[in-house]
Image: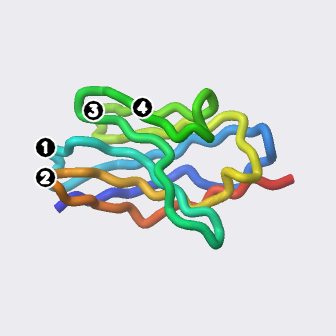
Amino acid sequence: QVQLVESGGGLVQPGGSLRLSCAASGSIFSIAAMGWYRQPPGKQRELVARITSGGSTNYADSVKGRFTISRDNGKNTVYLQMNGLKPEDTAVYYCYALKLGLTYWGQGTQVTVSS
């Protein structure tokens, strides 16, 4: 089992920044990838960014150049630095971990971009 705890969401004005954190615990060996999905109000969950165990990263086109995913292996934590936030980034953001074909999810953290 892998437990994921997210933090860092909140309310921010357009153009502002937030950093989300996702701390993994439990059986963290053999995690192939970690990342973030988001679910805007009334819409389906979508992939935002991911980072593999080898350090490769992928981003949704809508966040490229604004969001950066990184990890601290010593702290078993993945970060999502979000800059230039737009109202359309408003969503619940979920951390996930992929291990041996199973996907583990965090509880979600709300990000609201509004003036």
Q: Residue at x 47, y 54 (%)?
A: 37
> Viewer-nearest of labels 1 and 3?
1
Q: Nearer the viewer, residue 72 or 15?
A: 15
What colour scheme does the image use? rainbow
> Residue at coordinates 56% horizontally, 41% vertically from top-left?
19
29 vs 83: above or below: below
Given this view, does label 3 or label 4 mark the residue nearer the observer?
4
* Residue 16: image location, x then y, percent: 75, 39
Crowding around mark 1 (Cα neighbors within 10 Å: few <14, some 14 to 19, many 20+) is few
Circle 4 sits in a helix, a strand or a loop, which is it?
strand
Numbered disc 2: secondary structure: loop
Q: Residues within 10 Å of mark 3 (few under 14, many from 20)?
A: few
Residue that extends furthest to the bottom in the rendered view of this protein? 42
User: Which element carries disc 1, helix, strand or loop?
Assistant: loop
Distance from disc 1 to disc 3, alpha carbons, whole Å, reads 13 Å
Q: Does 34 sit left or right of 69 as displayed?
A: left
Which residue is tagged 4? Answer: 70
Q: Position of residue 86 (x, y in %)?
A: 75, 45
**Dot 1 amino acid type:** Ser
Question: Which residue corresponds to mark 2?
Answer: 100
Dot label at residue 73: 3
Sequence-wise, the earlier of marks 1 and 3 is 1
